[in-house]
Image (cartoon, rainbow, N blue to C red):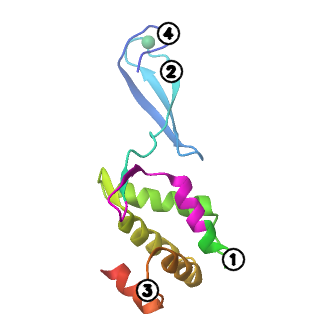
């Protein structure tokens, strides 16, 4: 990061703050002239590729995830915003540290997150994405 006053490339971080949109604001101090400036850092959106049941590959789209969560949460009065749930699921998927994930990975993690919010939403999501339909099946699927 180049100092805006003298162009020196070395600086130290004196303060970091996490912002609502998941970017980070940093106060930096130039190691050459000692002046301070602010930078904003954002995380690049997910580079994951999803392989579906037909072995087709497509980039991971959080919008698609939001749609299916909204559908599962429809009429179930889920207490958390769809946005938050989708972000939580995406974070967990990124946490797998895999470039390629399967739709099964997504379903499994979505269920892990949804089961804590609403059993019914979880059930709806599950029946929407698999062919079993009892809650015991869901538990088995999660624990697999
Ligand atoms: Zn400087």
Residue 5 is marked as: 4
Picture layout, residue 106 above or below residue 34 = below
Distance, label 4 to label 3, CA atoms, is 63 Å
Q: Which-is-in-front pick, marks 4 and 2?
A: 4
Front of the two marks 1 and 3? 3
Real-space CA distance between mark 4 and mark 1, rounded to the nearest whole angstrom: 53 Å
Whole-Å distance between the Cαs marked 1 and 2? 48 Å
- Which residues make up the magenta segment? 52-69
Q: Which residue is mark 3?
A: 132
Residue at 57 percent across and 60 percent down: it is: 66
The reply to whether the residue tagged 1 has its Cβ within 8 angstroms of ligand 1 is: no
Q: Is residue 144 magenta?
A: no
User: Vertical placement of 90 versus 128: above or below?
Assistant: above
Instruction: Compare marks 4 and 3 and give the one earlier in the sequence.
Output: 4
Count neighbours of disc 2 (C-alpha within 10 A) and say few if under 14, some if 14 to 19, many if 20 or more. some
Tell us which disc is closer to us: 4 or 3: 3
Answer with mark 4 or mark 2, whichever residue precedes in sequence.
4
Q: Quadrant of residue 97?
A: bottom left
Proximity of marks 4 and 1: CB atoms separated by less than 8 Å: no
Is 144 or 134 nearer to us in this picture?
Answer: 134
SS type, badge 2: strand
Question: Answer yes or no: do the residues labelled 3 and 2 have beta carbons within 8 Å?
Answer: no
Which of the image's four quarters has the C terminus?
A: bottom left
CB of mark 4 near ligand 1 (< 8 Å): yes
Cα gap from disc 4 to disc 2, whole angstroms: 9 Å
Secondary element type, mark 3? loop
Name the foreground residue: 55 vs 100.
55
- Residue most extreme to the top: 6
Where does the N terminus fall, quadrant-wise?
top left
């Amino acid at each position: 990061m180049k100092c805006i006053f003298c162009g020196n490339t070395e600086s130290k971080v004196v303060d970091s703050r996490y912002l609502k949109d998941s970017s980070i604001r940093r106060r930096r101090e130039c190691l050459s002239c000692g002046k301070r400036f602010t930078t904003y850092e954002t995380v690049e959106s997910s580079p994951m590729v999803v392989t579906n049941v037909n072995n087709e590959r497509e980039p991971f789209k959080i919008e698609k995830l939001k749609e299916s969560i909204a559908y599962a949460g429809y009429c179930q009065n889920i207490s958390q915003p769809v946005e938050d749930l989708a972000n939580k699921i995406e974070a967990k998927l990124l946490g797998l540290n895999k470039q390629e994930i399967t739709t099964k990975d997504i379903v499994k993690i979505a269920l892990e997150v949804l089961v804590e919010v609403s059993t019914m939403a979880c059930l709806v999501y599950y029946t929407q994405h698999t062919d079993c339909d009892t809650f015991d099946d869901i538990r088995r699927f999660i624990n697999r």
